[in-house]
Image (cartoon, rainbow, N blue to C red):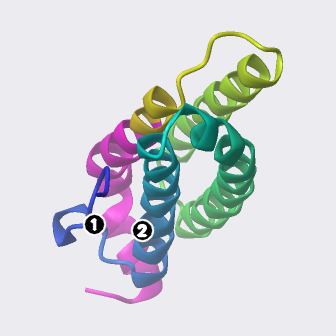
Amino acid sequence: MELVEWSDKYSVGIPEIDEQHKKLLDIANQLFAACVQGKDAAQMEFRRIVKEAVKYVQTHFSFEEELMKKAGYPLYAEHKAEHAAFVAKVLEGVRDFEGGKPFVPNNFARFLRDWTLEHIAITDKQYENCLKAHLGQK
């Protein structure tokens, strides 16, 4: 059972970015799958999965932001700020978990899914035409 399944409606029309977005959703699915196995499995898997998520998110955001800068995307600063706020929220969840605060991995998986889908559907879709033109795509 998956938390979210990729659909072409999430595509920004740039294959490399679409593949990166699929990977982000896969990370949320991995955490959700651990939650379905029970609290202990979720707790054990959380640390591994969230480290992967933080590393991958930073890689993806760097790639996307560099492409936006090269394309002269006019909303670059706002987009970058959204990325920074997301990373801060993820790191807050990690600190809470590691600090022993009550933590529900299932809620965190849903947060990853919801943020990623909303970000793609609204924020990333705004750069689609600009980046595609920069890359010579239609």
Task: Report x, y in % for residue 44.
Answer: 70, 43
Residue type at tag 2: Lys
* Image mark for residue 63: none
- The mark nearer the N terminus, 1 or 2, is 1
Task: Report x, y in % for residue 116.
Answer: 41, 46
Q: Is residue 30 left or right of residue 65?
A: left
Residue drawn 66% across and 52% down? 49
Residue drawn 74% across and 43% down? 47
- Depth check: give the residue in front, 103 or 61: 103
Does residue 127 belong to the magenta stretch?
A: yes
* Distance from Cα at disc 1 to Cα at disc 2: 6 Å
Q: Quadrant of the C terminus?
A: bottom left
By secondary structure, the bulk of the magenta-drawn segment is best described as: helix
Farthest residue, direction left: 9
Determine contact: label 1, label 2, CB under 8 Å: yes
- Depth check: give the residue in front, 111 or 9: 111
| Magenta span of residues | 112-138
Residue drawn 73% across and 17% down? 96
Residue drawn 50% across and 56% down? 30
Residue type at tag 1: Trp
What residue would you read off at disc 1?
6
Task: Report x, y in % for residue 60.
Answer: 62, 62
Are there few (<14), some (14-19), or many (20+) residues within 10 Å of tag 1?
A: some
Task: Report x, y in % for residue 115.
Answer: 41, 37
What residue would you read off at disc 2?
22
Are there few (<14), some (14-19), or many (20+) residues within 10 Å of tag 2?
A: some
